[in-house]
Amino acid sequence: MPLKRTTERQHPLWQLTLMRFRIFMREPAAVFWTYGFPLALALVLGVAFRNRPPEPVQVAVQQTPEAAEAFIILSNNPSVLVRSLPAREAHEALRDGKVSLVVIPGHPRTYEFDPTRPESRMARALVDDALQRAEGRTDPTPVQNQLMTEPGSRYIDFLIPGILGFNFMSSGLWGVGFVIVEMRVRKLIKRMTATPMARTHFLLSFVLVRGFFLLGELPLLLAFAHWVFAVPIRGSLLLILALSVLGSLMFAGIGLLLGSRAQNTHTVGGLVNAVSLPMLMCSGVFFSAARFPELVQPIIRALPLTALIESVRLVMLDGAGPLAVLRQICIMVLWGVVSFLIALRIFRWQ
Amino acid sequence: MSPEQMENAPAIRCRSLVKDYGTLRAVDGLDLEVRAGECFGLLGPNGAGKTTTVEILEGLLPATSGQVELLGQTWQTGAARLRQRLGISLQETNLADKLTVEETLRLFRSFYEAGPDIEQLLELVSLTDKRKSWYVKLSGGQKQRLAVACALAGDPQIVFMDEPTTGLDPQSRRQLWTLIEMFKSEGRTVLLTTHYMDEAQRLCDRVAIVDKGKVIAQGTPRDLIQSLGGTEVVELTCDSPMDPGPVSSLPGVHAAKANGNNLTLTLEQLHKTLPLLLEQVRQAGRTMTALSTHHATLEDVFVSLTGRHLRD
């Protein structure tokens, strides 16, 4: 039975992308790390660092004949948690950090505290203010307080763009770099290069499928952050999407580069860790990158992950427009294009 | 080169092929010419350079020196056209574990401009029932048949098969043989490497025996076996070494070789020579501890050329 030839076929780039998509969706662990893990991380950190009312300061009033009045005044102040102790025990409680301040009533009144402990200095100011007012002091200028606890300035608001960037980085580096080396080890790449398959199609399929998965990751994390923690999205959603696509493609390109030569999965695993761990520390995922010394700031700002997180943060929290994040966009384009081109040149096909 | 010239050129030709890996010379001045439409076997022990040779011919490895032409084209100038016309089954093909048979074929089919549709390919390798199964769930024979179907996805003129039946059970091997016989009947050129003699004898129109990176004999399996002089092989083992001299002068004996207590003879007519041989052993005062006979095979050709067995 001779074979009947037909020229009907699907586009190879489509088939390659479809292959990547299917393989990913059939790997439950990969799906969890891409979709479930960032949500779990946001939930845990969001709950752990949620805004709580300020804790009352712990204060001891030393038992002296005049102590009763001071004790009652402080007991009625919600910002102070007060206990009455004999002299020796009060001193020990201060030394052990159980209280921040010891009040020794009398004339003059004595405050015993450790000036190097911020909470002690705060207790000193708070207690003195409370006692002086109760004793009749008046303020020359009336004051009022404006409290800043609205969404947009809390830790969780800061954290969500960080997790987003971190997630795009790990999916890109592991999902592209590691998977390519796995295919090389199994000689699947060799088998495919023995066909007329275009090599750029093969490499592009990895990048494309990353862009595709992002369309699931991004809305999921944003919706979660919005509904669970009321994280605001002040800038354009479209711009956030564009930045995420760019960031994802950039990390797919870097992943491609990391996987371009390695002959076993240990090597590529080490490479991915060597690249991603420093960025996890320095690029402002969990705390602001601005805390590092001025000297290293230019380097930190040029890192791919910093550019991605900074730009998403600016758009999400400050409502920045495209021009305000132009520098970050240029950095990401540069990283992505250069990595992809180098990968294409040095890729080990056999 | 016109299409007609391409058809008339030898399917595969290589001259003075050399491949070095550092100081190791894996292929050492190898010449081959495979005619269009024939099934050609590269035969040899593991490490003889068969796979290296085939991968150079397939354009997957660069040669250190030498010329390679397929269908009148070289890899330097005709790679894109050649890729469309070759079908390749590598020594170990691991396809993606979690793609189904059908998905894998659709992927490979998409790489070729023209070829059979998926239904034909499935039917051809008897995997229609397994079309929805993941690759990882297939048996060894089914995996190998899928690898063959992938090789056929572009309706190739030349099919390369590197050790297609290694590690398969006898039934799966026979199924693959039937497939290979079918490509031959369709006029495709097949280049096969194997270290199974029965496989080469059954499938190949011509074989080249390769050892240490060189072709040491070439011809039809029949001619090669006849070059031994006899078509029967007798192997006997005695309690102590025996001089092959007197034995080789027995009527009908073409060659006799001693190796320790073993004696190997090739001869023409077993029923006439065997009684005389036994008589000789008795007269020499030896006691036989083992005796076996078989029809000569390509294995015996290899042994007579190199003094070693193929699967040592």
Image (cartoon, rainbow, N blue to C red):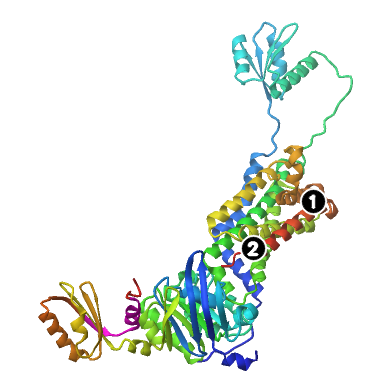
- Name the front one of labels 1 and 2: 2
Please rate how many residues cluster around mark 1, counting C-alpha atoms within 10 Å: few if below 14, some from 14 to 19, many from 20: many
**Mark 2 residue element:** helix
| Towards the viewer: B285 or A109 | B285
Residue A100 to residue A220: above or below:
above
Dot 2: chain letter = A
Residue A213 placement: quadrant: bottom right
Q: Is residue A297 left or right of residue B72?
A: right
Tell whether A183 sits left or right of B247: right
Dot 1 or dot 2, earlier in sequence: 1
Q: Position of residue A247 (x, y in %)?
A: 72, 56
Which amino acid, mark 2? Ile
Image x and y of residue A109, in percent? 74, 9
Amino acid residing under circle 1: Val
Nearest the viewer among A42 and A279 is A279
* Residue plotted at (74% across, 59% down): A246
Disc 1 from disc 2: Cα separation: 36 Å
Residue under label 2 = A346
* Discs 1 and 2 share one subunit: yes
Query: Can you tell which quarter of the image residue B177 is in?
Result: bottom left
Q: Is residue A347 visible?
A: yes
Looking at the rendered structure, the secondary structure element under dot 1 is helix
- Whether B247 is drawn above or below A51: the answer is below
Q: Residues within 10 Å of mark 2 (few under 14, many from 20)?
A: few
Region of the chain picked out in magenta, as a range: B292-306
Front one among B112 and A42: B112
**What percent of the width, then of the height, locates residue A139?**
86, 19
Numbered circle sitting on residue A315: 1
Q: Chain of mark 1?
A: A
Residue displayed at 64% across by 43% down: A45
Name the main secondary structure of what is drawn in magenta.
Answer: helix
